[in-house]
Image (cartoon, helix red, strand yellow):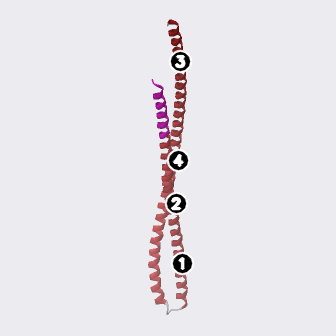
């Protein structure tokens, strides 16, 4: 084979291997970035829901304190009793609403727990994917090293052939000079 073709093939192997390694690295970085954004969004969502639960708890406590205050006033005066009963009915309705809201908040908290468990599973899957990519990268590096060693072997072979070729040319030149 012509030496210039061997050089071209050597460069093509390097370029192909380089592009494969580059693609694997870029894919790994892309996967890490996507999962990072997804995990961050879920954490932000969890924080927002926890803040909402805290606000609901404070709202419930404020309503309970208000109910206690209204009951104390009712025992002091009989004339306020009708007014108290109306307020009590309103407060009971609000407590029902609050209980419903508390139930909803508890359901949301449970959903958050499930989401956190799912996030944990996704995190484990991501770790597995990263480990797979790491192993594939190691394999690709081993293949690159093997290709480099093959290239060195063939370069050595070509060098030896070139030396033999030069020796034969020299020998032929000497024989032509003797016969002439």
Circle 1: element type:
helix
* Disc 3/disc 2 C-alpha distance (Å): 72 Å
* Disc 1/disc 4 C-alpha distance (Å): 45 Å
Q: Quadrant of the N terminus?
A: top left
Can you tell which mark lies on residue 127? 4
Is mark 3 in CB contact (under 8 Å) with mark 2? Answer: no
Task: Give whichever of discs 1 and 3 has the lower sequence position.
Answer: 1
* Above or below, comparing residue 41 to residue 9 in the picture: below
Task: Give whichever of discs 1 and 4 has the lower sequence position.
Answer: 1
Can you tell which mark lies on residue 43? 2
Is mark 1 in CB contact (under 8 Å) with mark 2? Answer: no
Judge by depth and name the residue closer to the eye, 136 or 67: 136
Can you tell which mark lies on residue 62? 1
Task: Give whichever of discs 1 and 2 has the lower sequence position.
Answer: 2
Q: Which residues are magenta?
A: 1-20
Can you tell which mark lies on residue 166? 3
Which class describes the residues within 10 Å of circle 2: few (<14), some (14-19), or many (20+)? some
Q: Position of residue 110 (x, y in %)?
A: 48, 61
Which class describes the residues within 10 Å of circle 1: few (<14), some (14-19), or many (20+)? few
* Disc 1/disc 2 C-alpha distance (Å): 29 Å
Task: Give whichever of discs 4 and 2 has the lower sequence position.
Answer: 2
> Dominant secondary structure of the magenta stretch?
helix
Circle 2: element type:
helix
Is mark 1 in CB contact (under 8 Å) with mark 3? Answer: no
Judge by depth and name the residue closer to the eye, 103 or 137: 137
């Amino acid at each position: 084979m012509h030496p210039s073709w061997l050089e071209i093939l050597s460069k093509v192997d390097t370029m192909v291997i380089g592009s494969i390694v580059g693609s694997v690295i870029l894919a790994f970085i892309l996967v890490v970035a996507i999962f990072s954004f997804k995990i961050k969004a879920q954490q932000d969502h969890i924080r927002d829901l926890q803040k909402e639960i805290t606000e609901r708890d404070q709202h419930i406590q404020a309503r309970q304190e208000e109910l206690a205050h209204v009951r104390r006033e009712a025992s002091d005066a009989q004339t306020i009793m009708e007014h108290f009963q109306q307020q009590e009915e309103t407060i009971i309705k609000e407590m029902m609403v609050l209980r419903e809201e508390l139930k909803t908040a508890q359901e949301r908290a449970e959903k958050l727990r499930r989401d956190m468990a799912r996030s944990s599973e996704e995190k484990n899957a991501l770790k597995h994917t990263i480990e797979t990519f790491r192993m594939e990268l190691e394999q690709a590096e081993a293949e690159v090293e093997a290709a480099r060693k093959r290239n060195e072997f063939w370069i050595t072979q070509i060098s030896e052939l070139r030396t033999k070729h030069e020796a034969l040319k020299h020998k032929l030149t000497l024989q032509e000079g003797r016969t002439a």
